[in-house]
Amino acid sequence: MEPSHAQALTGAPQLIFGLPIQNERLAKLTRKVLIVALVSAVLVLIPGVMGLASGGGAQAPSLVLGMALALLVPICGYLGAKKSDQNLTCCFCGCNLLGSCLTIFSFVTAFAASGALSYIVQSCDPSNDDGTGCPTADQWLTMCPDLAEGYTAEDCYADLQGKAGNMQSTLHWMVLLQVLSVLVQCLGFCWGHQLYSELKQGAVLVQPPMYPTATMAVQRQPPTNPYAGGRA
């Protein structure tokens, strides 16, 4: 039995994001992979642009670098499909698997940090502190490095109150984005792995163009007798 990608190709090729793919089944799989790559690129850009728009300041270079590095993953997916490159496709599905794990970890970490901050704000007012699980006087003076030097525990507490409010409002859209990111990354891994398996078996997604071979008719000349001119 022939491999699925070696079946007879019939009909005109399908254009998938500008890539002419003739095998219908591979065309559908490639479309899924490239849609996932496009959506993941958008999900990468949204928080980065929001961070820059909200006044990233000193964090702007790291935000831009982070977006550029994250965009390499969908680029690997597109180029892997365009060039039928199993290495780029493997990189795409592997990075999606790793990205989903890191996204889940950051999600859990953000919720833990939000819970700890909420506890400090609700239970650790320096003016009325019972000392149970709250920062010590020395710890208060190291918890708010963004404040001007010489701040008091009350100044730090007020700063943390504002950050707690901002974090709670941020968590709402953060939950939505991260749930979508994990879903997209899991789909990217599954479909990317399927495409990688096809390419590993020798499938070629984009067939090279077929150019007609030009033929030129050559008229056969009758043989000549070298001795004909020497006869009397």
Image (cartoon, rainbow, N blue to C red):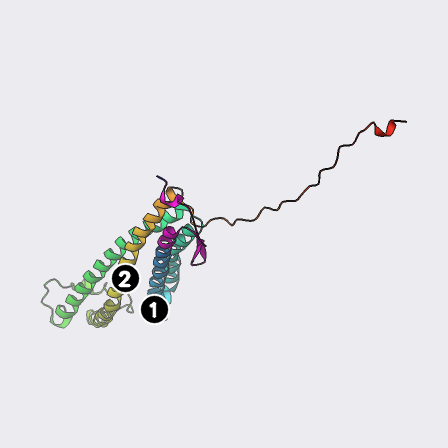
Task: Identify the residue shown where x is 36% and y is 59%.
Answer: 35
Label 1 crowding class (10 Å Cα cut-off): few <14, some 14-19, many 20+? few
Task: Locate residue 149: give its quadrant.
Answer: bottom left
Mark number displayed over residue 180 = 2
The reply to whether residue 73 is in sight is no
Q: On the picture, is 24 further left or further right than 224?
A: left
State whether residue 204 is above or below residue 117. Answer: above
Q: Which residue is mark 1?
A: 50
Label 2 crowding class (10 Å Cα cut-off): few <14, some 14-19, many 20+? some
Q: The C terminus appears in which quarter of the rendering? A: top right
Extent of the magenta region: 2-30
State whether residue 66 is above or below residue 130. Answer: above
**Front residue of 101 and 131:** 101
- Give x and y (percent) for residue 134: 14, 64
- Give x and y (percent) for residue 142: 23, 63
Cα separation, mark 1 vs mark 2, equals 17 Å
**Front residue of 190 and 224:** 224
Element assignment for label 1: helix
Q: Nearer the viewer, mark 1 or mark 2?
A: 2
- Give x and y (percent) for residue 43: 33, 63
Magenta segment includes 9: yes
Dot 1 or dot 2: first in sequence order is 1
Element assignment for label 2: helix
